[in-house]
Image (cartoon, grey):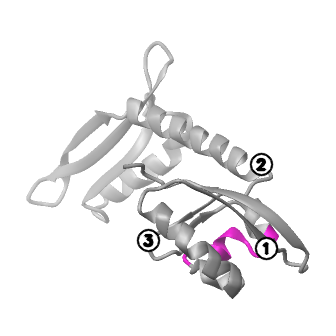
Amino acid sequence: VDITHLDDLPGDLDNVARLTAGIIPVYSNEKRYIRKDGSIRWGSLNLTTIRNGYDEVVYYVAQIEDITARKKAEESLKKSEERLELVMNGVPTFIFSLDKQMRFVYVNKPMAAFFGYSEDAMIGKDVREFLPEKMYSALTPQFRKVIRGQEVTCEYAVSDKEGKEHVLETHLVPQMRR
């Protein structure tokens, strides 16, 4: 108990009690351990019991895998994703991604706001739902080129949610270059 991080202790004790009472057959958890030098390591704990003929606990069998490196990598990835999201949504540029069926996979906040929607409202929807037919017809060949792996730059006029017309220059880039 004294090697378990204090923040992880209440849940740990509750689940060990449930394991001991026979309510659960195995207890698994990712938690922090405190080393002798005071440093913290992450571990993946799997705990079960060995019981006698009277269903009394005779032994606890524990397996702990050091997952500190994975936890550090997850935290690093999370911070990187947060930075990327700040950039993607902080630039006054439309950034989006379409799948091969021309449905939005990603839309940044400035683009969604321009069309008067939330990002989530646009995800999974066909680009046609957001573009006037004339613009859709003009851009479809450009989108198809990008889907085939080509980079494309084009200009077109588009109306915002208030109906004001804007001329946009768009640089379309394939997600994976061939």
Q: Which mark is residue 100?
A: 3
- Which badge, 1 or 3, comes first in the chain's sequence? 3
Q: Secondary structure at mark 3?
A: loop
Q: Which mark is residue 91?
A: 2
3D distance between C-alphas at marks 3 and 2: 26 Å
Is residue 20 in view?
no
Horizontal and vertical percent position of residue 68: 40, 31
Is residue 111 in view?
yes
**Mark 1, mark 3: which one is toward the viewer?**
1
3D distance between C-alphas at marks 1 and 3: 23 Å
Which amino acid, mark 1?
A: Val
Which amino acid, mark 3?
A: Lys
Query: Is 7 drawn above or below residue 146 in the view shown?
Result: above
Find out whether residue 25 is within the magenta segment: no
- The residue segment tinted magenta is 114-124
Q: Residues within 10 Å of mark 2 (few under 14, many from 20)?
A: few
Q: Is residue 16 left or right of residue 95?
A: left
Which amino acid, mark 2?
A: Val
The residue that disc 1 covers is: 158
- Which badge, 1 or 2, comes first in the chain's sequence? 2
Relative depth, front residue between 91 and 73: 91
